[in-house]
Amino acid sequence: MEAINPYTYVRNCWYVAGLSKEFPREQLTGHRIAGRAMVIWRAADGQVTALDDRCAHKRFPLSEGKLLPDGNLECAYHGLCYDTTGTCVRIPSQPDQPIPPQARVPRVALLEQDGLVWVWPGDPARCEERRPPRTPEIGDEAYESIDSGPMHVPANYLLLIENLLDISHFYPLHDGNIGDIENSKIPVALEEGEEDGNRFVRTVRQVSDYKQPPFLQDWFHHAIVDRHHTHCMASPAHTRVVMRNAPPGKLGTDVERGYVLMHTHTPIDEKSHIWRWIVNCPADHMSAGDPNMSAARRVASMFPKVVAEDRWALEKQQQMFDLPADGYSELFLKPDKALRRARHIFVSMLREERAGSEASSIGTAKATG
Ligand code: FES
Ligand SMILES: [Fe+2]
């Protein structure tokens, strides 16, 4: 069987284009997601639409155009106008002729769910097979939810997923803030399964009488804790982290602290992605480091230091992919088990995608041959 490089990107997947609040009404935004250029906007009626960002006439990016009072999108170059289905409804230079049927741009499948806007850059016929993972804490009044905004990372998105699934990098990369050497020794259990059509891999780290690193004491109060910590790649688009901390024997009681930390990783191309993190803490939890600051706000103010360390590592790692292999062989350690499972999911999705596109091109050849 032909080897498949997992460090490309999966197209048949729901990816986060942004938070709902990043799409105010009647504002065009241009995106590149899994190699596909899209223009996305929220119409006056509140519905969000995504079209290919390439005018049918001369490829001009439609995201540079403007929305007209009638709701149609006018290309900024020669003025072709498109409705929200991508059909051209007006050609200013030939008003007396019928609009040719090929004057249209493909529509991109889009869903708005739990405060996020998701798009499916791949085969639209397959988009019903999966649903975006749920993110119920966003918009839930019981939680305070704070997001990073979009961060451009010059690295393949699978490198970020691998980073999130393997927290043995907390020492030395995050030593002294969220990690230490003891963290690397916590045993890891793995769970795998499928939810909403998405295969997931989850790591579970449980530890008792654990001395919390400084940032975690600052956010969640307790110095010595029982801790339950999971990282779940819920799909190639989203990793969900849940951390629960309490003094020994008190997990599940009202002194428990922690967060749900969502990471979204949306590929731009093979060598870059957009990373967003969204931290969610119970709305009434205050931090220890600043008793006047909520736990979520305190995490959001300190987490960028940790993220900068990860971004640095991902960028450096990506640069090494440009070197010739020269007999290089990757070394696998015990904590790498989860990332190997994530790669396996990527490879099987890519293989399935490739088989699907070969089958449809054979079908097309038969139909035309
Ligand atoms: S390129 Fe868009 S109208 Fe000509
Ligand atoms: Fe990290």
Image (cartoon, rainbow, N blue to C red):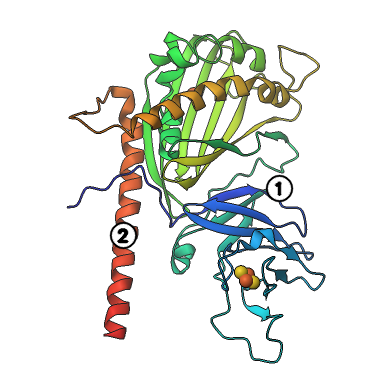
Q: Position of residue 239 (x, y in %)?
A: 50, 38
Within 10 Å of disc 1 (Cα), the crowding (few <14, some 14-19, many 20+) is some
At x 51%, y 27%, the residue is: 311
In the displayed structure, 244 sits above or below 148; it is above
At x 33%, y 24%, the residue is: 335
Q: Earlier in the sequence, mark 2 or mark 1?
A: 1
Mark 2 → mark 1, Cα distance in angstroms = 33 Å
Among the 4 quarters of the image, the one containing residue 288: top right
Viewer-nearest residue: 44 or 58: 58
Position of 323 with respect to 295 (left or right) is left
SS assignment at label 1: helix
Among the 4 quarters of the image, the one containing residue 104: bottom right
Say which amino acid is labelled 1: Glu
Among the 4 quarters of the image, the one containing residue 192: top left
Viewer-nearest residue: 316 or 47: 316
Q: Position of residue 3 (x, y in %)?
A: 22, 47
The residue beneath circle 2 is: 354
In the displayed structure, 159 sits above or below 24; it is above
Say which amino acid is labelled 2: Arg
At x 27%, y 82%, the residue is: 366
Position of 44 with respect to 34 (left or right) is right
Within 10 Å of disc 2 (Cα), the crowding (few <14, some 14-19, many 20+) is few
- The mark found on residue 22 in the picture is 1
